[in-house]
Image: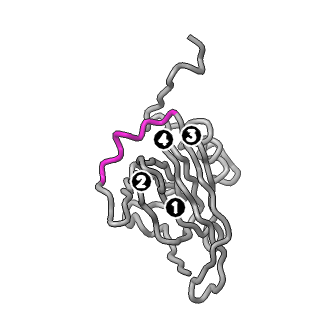
Amino acid sequence: MPRDTILLQMSFSDFIVRLTAALDADGSTPKDTVAALMRDTIEEIDLAPHLTSPANDCGYSRNIVHTDPKGRFSVLAIEWLPGAMTAIHGHRAWGCVGVAEGTIGCDMFELVNEETHQVRLSDFIEAEKGAIAAVDPKPCGIHRLYNRGTKRAVTLHVYGIDLSTDPCCINVPYHF
């Protein structure tokens, strides 16, 4: 059977081992290292066992599935029900997101007023399975994610911050 017809699956723990080793060996920007690893593995990682939290009022569930013992990064698996949408936000640290299942939309915003955190829509994309994106800390990378489809979507997020004590500390809220 040709290799491209074989479904390969990587355990989540294998992904964490590879991620940790890559960050241990890398002297460049962690975001770039993580994005490269995610490009190579996102379609192989089995996230299903890690989607254990119920959806919040916005229609998605955040599942912290790993925090680095050295505090360098945290990994989340997020399940997006149809109609799910985040608030407009930026991040306090670098981050990478990969679409493991379905399609995710992303509205991108530019900062209008730093003092009031007011933004305006600047662009949008639809990202399908296998897509990888990287974001820089505030005020760069202000966005809103959503699932406008009729089926669930699943994304994998790696952030350069320890989220073990406060899972929401990564987000910086913005508004129109």
Q: Is residue 149 magenta?
A: no
**N-term mark: 3 or 4:** 4
What element does badge 1 sit on?
strand
Mark 3 Cα shell of 10 Å, populated few (<14), some (14-19), many (≥20): few
Q: Which residue is mark 1?
A: 145
Mark 1 Cα shell of 10 Å, populated few (<14), some (14-19), many (≥20): many
Q: Quadrant of the N terminus?
A: top right
**N-term mark: 3 or 2:** 3
Q: Which residue is mark 4?
A: 16
Give the mark toward the camera: 2 or 4.
2
Mark 4 Cα shell of 10 Å, populated few (<14), some (14-19), many (≥20): some
Circles 2 and 1 in contact, beta carbons < 8 Å: yes
Circles 3 and 1 in contact, beta carbons < 8 Å: no
**N-term mark: 2 or 4:** 4
Disc marking residue 21: 3
**N-term mark: 3 or 1:** 3
Give the mark toward the camera: 1 or 4.
1
